[in-house]
Amino acid sequence: MPKISERGRMIPSSPIRKLTKFAEIAAQKGIYIYHLNIGQPDIHTPKELWDAVKNIDLDVLAYSPSSGYEDLRIKYAAYFSERRDLKNFHADDILITTGASEALLFTMLALFDDGDEIIAMEPLYANYVGYSLSSGIQMKPITTRFEDGFALPSIDDFEKTITSRTKAILICNPSNPTGYIYSDAELERLKEIALKHDLFIISDEVYREFNYTGQPHKSMMTFKELENHVVLVDSISKRFSACGARIGMVASKNQKVLETILKFAQQRLSPPTIEQIGAKALFDVDDTYFEEVSREYQQRRNALVDGLNQIEGVKCHKPNGAFYCMVQLPVKDTEHFCQWMLEDFEYEGATVMMAPGSGFYATPGLGKNEVRMAYVLGVENLKKAVITLEQGLKTYRERY
């Protein structure tokens, strides 16, 4: 039998989706599942998108430009420069991609050669590891500590990790999976490291609207000194609760970087046409939409985190951003526990689906007692999920 590639063998399964088959079997048994495993919001997608799609008047569903429609890039640029913290942002600084996933993958392909190294803080978005392996890159993780609230490590930790093959630092701000938001001082520290070692910074800012600190989100692109160093990745998926539209973008003031990414974009021809038309209308959504959504997520965060911390042996920080939290559970192997919850446990006809924490670490052996939870359900369902989890932990610990 022909063999698959070594690259294909090495890429890990998604910790977010790998237990799906067990969830499907549980659902077939009539068990209700509280899905805290995946960042799929239940917040309504703005009506502007649906109206734009319904009113499409085309005779031919044609390719769009490989860089995306110019009018969408103009809307994106205006959103950042006029309504957010990124001034002098222009359409020519942007390429539209098929989700932030494609933006990240194309960026890595454009910036790295085989064997080059990228630094990322762990716990990290699980797919970063897969993108790196797909691109022939060596992931060099720096571990952040639960005890420190997942704060940025010291400069010494970076200096010990940087080698002659290091090309970039990858950050997610606000963080998926921890919900951590970097302080101005931490961003300054990253700037100093990038300038000293002449590194790119890939800044994943998909969750920028989910910021509960009371202070504006600050982007790495606000540093004038880093214009040629920063590549910004963004998406409409979470901001507008439009995950299925698959519209993202990559931006940089470094035109050589964008020209190179465009070569990969040309190979896949174009981002989706209909979704770009819908996405363009989203940038006309009033800021009150984000304010309402932010209040809702803060209520959900409080309900979940406060409830979790009342369970014996469970620990969880209250995140300042995004809609995730990393949770320590009083079990030795959360992968086994999460599967058991789906296969063998129910409480009042329901169970809870979570993402095992080890999948969010690039260092083997870490995160074995952690899970990532997404507070994407309403408050009442989150409270019920916490009760179900508490009962599950009690039963599990009696058996194992």
Image: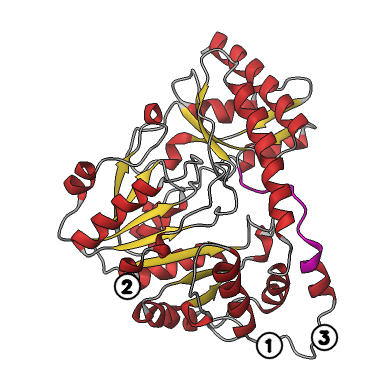
Comparing marks 1 and 3, which lies closer to the viewer?
Answer: 3
The image quarter containing residue 26 is: top right
Percent position of residue 244, x then y = 68, 61
Comparing marks 1 and 2, which lies closer to the viewer?
Answer: 2
Q: Does residue 1 show up? A: no
Percent position of residue 59, x then y = 80, 91
* Residue drawn at 42 percent across, 63 percent down: 222
Residue 94 vertical placement versus 85 (above, below): below
Residue hosting label 1: 62
* Residue drawn at 26 percent across, 69 percent down: 113
Residue 90 vertical placement versus 284 (above, below): below
- In the image as oriented, which residue stretches furthest toward the left? 164
* Residue drawn at 56 percent across, 29 percent down: 338
| Lower sequence index among marks 2 and 3 | 3
Badge 3 amino acid = Asp
The prevailing secondary structure element of the residues shown in magenta is loop
| Lower sequence index among marks 1 and 3 | 3
Decide whether residue 366 is among the magenta residues.
no
Residue hosting label 2: 228
| Lower sequence index among marks 1 and 2 | 1
Q: Which residues are magenta?
A: 38-49
Q: Quadrant of the N terminus?
A: bottom left
